[in-house]
Amino acid sequence: MDFDAIRQWALDFIEAHKAWTPLIAGVLAFCESVAFLSFLVPATVILLALGPMIAAADVPFWPVVLCAALGAALGDWISYEFGHYFKDDAKRMWPMRRYPTAVARAEAFCGRWGAGAVALGRFFGPIRAVIPLVAGFFGVRRLPFQAANVASALAWAFILIAPGAGLMSWYRG
């Protein structure tokens, strides 16, 4: 199966199931944002590809972006609460225990930027799902965490999906 066949299959699926596209985007963003699931689901690439596909299939743009943002924010919130609940024990769990240097760097990042680390970390793939977990066990307060979480989730979802959707709309127009 070549890339063109995969692209066509995905486009056909989205066209046949337009109503499910926002939910699918939300689930993908959620998986990308939960600390342990993000290692298993390569959702960023799929979300990038979703932009031109929703434009080609005439799926409404904003519901997809908002559901992706909601999924990302919920995933980060769960990671934060996990870290907040388990504190230092979270560092001894898989996959954190395999990367003590990365955890130490994430802690230093949170120490320097606080809740801002959540907003900045959302845009850097390797640390995207780990920063909320670290923010939880590091003790970043909930309200600043949630403000950074929701704002960055909205920006992240838009930045991932809009370019492809806009370029496809321009190309077709």
Image: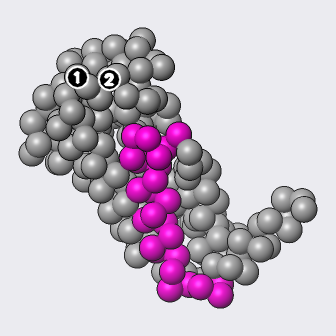
Q: Is residue 99 above or below residue 127?
A: above
In the image, what residue occupies the spot 85% across and 64% down? 4
Helix, strand or loop for the magenta stretch, by majority: helix
Q: Which residue appears at 59% of the width and 85% of the height?
A: 17
Outermost residue, right direction? 1
Q: How is the image coloured?
A: one colour
Q: Position of residue 138 (x, y in %)?
A: 19, 25
Residue 32 magenta-highlighted: yes
Residue 95 placement: quadrant = top left
Residue 151 versus residue 102: which sits nearer the camera?
102
Rendered view: 165 above or below 156: below
Q: Which residues are magenta?
A: 15-39
Say which quadrant the N terminus sits in. Answer: bottom right
Q: Position of residue 111 (x, y in %)?
A: 20, 18
Image mark for residue 88 = 1
Question: Which residue occupies the foreground of this view, 67 or 56?
Answer: 67
Contact check, label 2 and label 1, Cβ < 8 Å: yes
Q: Is residue 44 left or right of residue 99?
A: right
Mark 2 surroundings within 10 Å by alpha-carbon count, few (fewer than 14), some (14 through 19), many (20 or more) = many
The residue wearing badge 2 is 91
Identify which residue is drawn at 77% across, 67% down: 7
